[in-house]
Amino acid sequence: MKIKFILPSLIEAGNPLWRPIKYSLFPPLGLATLAGFLAPDDEAEIVDQHVQMLSFDDSPDIVAIEVYITNAYRAYDIADRYRKQGAFVILGGLHVTSLPEEAEKHADAVFLGPAEESFSRFLEDFRKGVRRKRYFSRERTLVGTPNIRRDLIDRSRYLVPNSIVVTRGCPHHCGFCYKDAFFKGGKSFYTQRVDDALAEIARLPGRHLYFLDDHLFGHRHFARDLFRGMEGTGRIFQGAATVDSILEGNLIEEAAKAGLRSLFVGFESLNPESLKQSNKQQNSGRDYERAIERLHDLGIMINGSFVFGLDGDDPSVFQRTVDWAVARGITTSTFHIATPYPGTAFYGEIKRAGRLTSGNWDHFDTRHVTFQPRGMTVQELQKGYDQAYGDFYSWNSIVRASLFHGSAKHQLKHFFYASGWKKFEPLWNLIVQLKRLNLMTPLLESVLSKTTKQNPIVQRPTAAHSGWLATQNRLEEI
Ligand code: B12
């Protein structure tokens, strides 16, 4: 049996609007996970449109497409085309789970929720000739799942090929997050076995890892054992965690010893009213300053995530947030315009109040305003968001934020990361483009491989998730 897995991109590689640095970050781990369930004699291919051109010049038996909100229209077009060509098309992922009726029009079968168990059930059905329209994830566990098929991923196409997810979901229930909608009807937070996670880490080459887990510290015992298992292995890594988990006990020290060098922290809002509206209990009343100081003292860089446009926000929120982040020495910041994803509590609230202003999923990318904010106009929100990025990444702010927090080494790293992220984006983009087109001269290759220790590619994630410039290995040596 021949199966083609596709991750459609919002903008296709080759389009002038395609942002190399953003779209070449991480390989499609979800699809590679599913491919692990195939039989040894099945033929599988993963095409990630973020980094590859998609050709329709083939005739797979099954086409499996991952649908996020922002790639939904493109996913549906691809699905329609392959169905016309006679393939059995299945759609799954976050957006399909939120809006199965919409997705169903373009698919032979849709999958709701995480698919480790339902996909293997589907394969069994398919081989027996049984056809069902919907699969819902019944059992939620990562125990006993096959190895993720990293062999189907062309590592050279990615800036951060060593991305890894060792948990699913999160223990919290923030109103704007995709999580509760996606994991509805079952467990919404579970982990791999520590031994399995360590074995997967051991299979990854190089030194640097990027954990994409929503909350790496979410299960404290799991996280502690994972960090203890990683200690002494020489790995350095990035991950995400909440303010309360940084403050509690000594998990953060354990993580630092294991190699944690930068952390994505969802501060989201400085406004208690907005935190309350978002059910962000893990932040409410927490001492942000103490969490930040703790990270500085351990030499861990901070990527702060902030959401603008929640009901407690007025036009002063942008400047206040930027000033606060600069004064506290936040290394990089990721700003989002509050976005009501279908299926979330936030979406329900906005829809019921008649405040939704857009139904164009392309715009649900946290960079466009898609609803009527309460404390400001749509224009103020859009402009304030753009301004916040400009202000936070001005040279003045970068220098001020770098100084006086943590050791001299920490300050130096901060300066390089923050400036490297925004100030040199055109250069990184050029490098990715040259790499993609195989035009990178041997000279440039050799310069880059000197700046990164193990991996000849400069590794760097996105502003949308965490804005790190990972000339990290090099910086580690300073
Ligand atoms: C890595 C990542 C990216 C990477 C690349 C995506 C990739 N290569 O997979 C990059 C940097 C490109 C990216 C970009 C963006 N991202 Co992003 N990203 C993520 C992140 C952090 C991890 C994804 C992941 O690997 N998950 C782990 C794997 C194992 O799970 P999975 O992919 O969901 O797959 C499982 C199931 O969904 C299911 N499944 C998935 N597909 C299919 C298909 C079939 C046929 C079947 C049967 C099952 C199935 O099976 C898998 C195993 O259970 C998620 C957050 C998250 N935790 O999911 C955000 C997330 C998906 N991103 C999000 C957003 C908003 C964006 C951007 C719009 C950001 C921006 N402002 O530009 C862009 C647009 C990308 C696009 N294509 O449209 C949102 C999506 C919201 C939504 N409702 O769709 C998320 C949830 C972040 C968030 N907290 O809001 N992203």
Image (cartoon, rainbow, N blue to C red):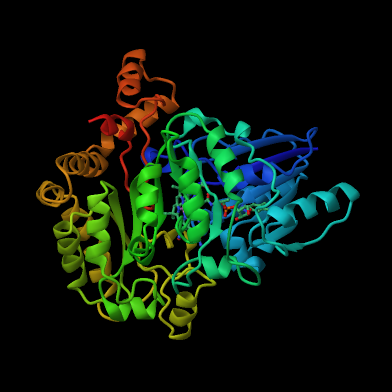
Q: Position of residue 407 (x, y in %)?
A: 17, 44
Closer to the camera in the image, 105 or 267: 267
Depth check: 68 or 456 in front? Answer: 456
Q: Quadrant of the C terminus?
A: top left
Q: What residue is at 14 percent from the left and 62 percent from the top? A: 323
60 on left or right of 209: right
Look at the image and tell me in which quarter the N terminus lies.
top right
Outermost residue, top direction? 442
Please say if 375 is above or below 414: below
Residue 170 seen in this snapshot: yes
Could you tell whether 13 is left or right of 244 in the image? right
Determine which quarter of the picture holds residue 270. bottom left
Q: Position of residue 271 (x, y in %)?
A: 26, 76
Residue at left 25%, top 59%? 292
Which residue sits furthest bottom? 353
Residue 463 in sight from this viewpoint: no
User: Height in image: 430 above or below 97?
Assistant: above
Q: Along the horizontal axis of the image, is 443 left or right of 342?
A: left
The picture quadrant where one finds residue 317 is bottom left
For this rendering, which residue is in front, 187 or 83? 187
Which residue occupies 49% across, 56% down? 70
Residue at point 41%, 77% (across, down)? 279
Considering only vertical position in the picture, is 234 above or below 251? above
